[in-house]
Amino acid sequence: MSTATHNAEALAQKLADSGLRSTPQREVVYDVLLRKRDHPTADEVFARVKSGLPSISLATVYNCLETLVQCDLVRAVNFERSPTRYCPNLRPHAHFHDEQTGKTHDIDLPPELLEKVSSVLPVGYDAKSVEIIFRGKATKSVASGG
Amino acid sequence: MSTATHNAEALAQKLADSGLRSTPQREVVYDVLLRKRDHPTADEVFARVKSGLPSISLATVYNCLETLVQCDLVRAVNFERSPTRYCPNLRPHAHFHDEQTGKTHDIDLPPELLEKVSSVLPVGYDAKSVEIIFRGKATKSVASGG
DNA sequence: CTTGCGCCTTAGAACCATTCTAATTTGTTG
DNA sequence: CAACAAATTAGAATGGTTCTAAGGCGCAAG
Ligand SMILES: [Mn+2]
Ligand SMILES: [Mn+2]
Ligand SMILES: [Zn+2]
Ligand SMILES: [Zn+2]
């Protein structure tokens, strides 16, 4: 069984859990996100997806991305008001935005840190999620996962 | 000396530091932010500012807000892709976004926490800023600062 | 099978927060 | 005052995203 097949089956399962269908469009969009984890924008996903499925529309890419986010297979990531980026990394992690290059890096977070951060909330505040964003310069380039 | 006068002078000083002029528009925009610290959008600032300066334009409100941000008197705050909000709180703090009410609350951060958070960065990552956003429900309403 | 009924995809229009443009006003300096 | 720069203004433009309406596709019942 190939990795692509495995991913497609995991996707189909997650979609089914939400009462949704697996479609070629949803599969190829998810596959594109898994193949190159550089936090692409919808436009960038659209460009990559077209090579495998030339008839897909930008509206469908937006629809698929929203579906993947709702199924908890992908995270939407925002920096200021720039175009939303998409991240298939499901581990707890922060984002480092390199202001020079515009690249986004995943920073794994130990679970104990998230507890520590959440512990600063006064009583009466019930956080469902915590997001951490670093901004700066990445002086070392890092091998990208594949 | 009134507080408003004091604020105006502090503003004039900060602007002068950046080679910029103090103007009635900049003063009233900053004053509006200080008077009601509920993280208003540009539109909301515009509405509040018009009562004191009916001739002001929305473009000028945007210009003034950008100027205040550049002078480090105000922080721009973003949640997903919703309209940018503005915060005159200069202490290190996180934001708690109440998903029920849409209200934004400041959460003061002990300096030691920011160090702890930054310490998860691998070598090669040089963060100039750290942003922390909580999302959830604030079960207790909190008295607003004045 | 074949038909019915949703779900899904699609192209293009609409939306709307923000930025840009070009003209005017205001303030400062000589 | 004259000259020049900085700031404000109205309105147009921009651009990422969402909406709309039409058609396509897949599954289930007959
Ligand atoms: Mn950037
Ligand atoms: Mn909200
Ligand atoms: Zn990520
Ligand atoms: Zn704040």
Image (spheres, coloured by chain):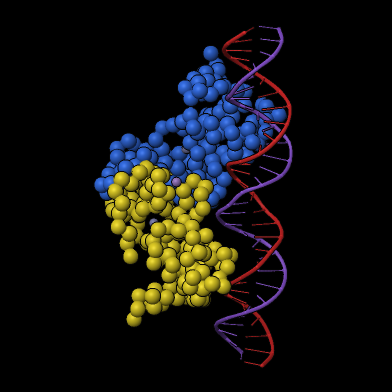
Chain colours: A blue, B yellow, C purple, D red
Residue A51: percent from the left, percent from the top? 68, 29
State whether residue A19 is above or below residue C15.
above
Picture residue at 25% right of the left edge, 47% below the top? A123
State whether residue A127 is above or below residue B16.
above
Residue D18, image quadrant: top right
Picture residue at 53% right of the left edge, 37% below the top? A86
Asked whether, in this view, residue D22 is left or right of residue A63, the answer is: right
Residue B139: percent from the left, percent from the top? 31, 45
Residue B12, image quadrant: bottom left
Residue B55 appears anywhere in the view: yes
Q: As rendered, which of A128 and D28 lies closer to the eye?
A: D28
Residue A3 appears anywhere in the view: no
Residue reaching furthest left? A123
Residue B51: percent from the left, percent from the top? 49, 70
Picture residue at 49% right of the left edge, 32% below the top? A70
Q: As rendered, which of A22 and B68 lies closer to the eye?
A: A22
Count of marks overlaid on the render: 0
Picture residue at 40% right of the left edge, 48% below the top? B101
Residue A44, image quadrant: top right
Residue B55: percent from the left, percent from the top? 56, 73
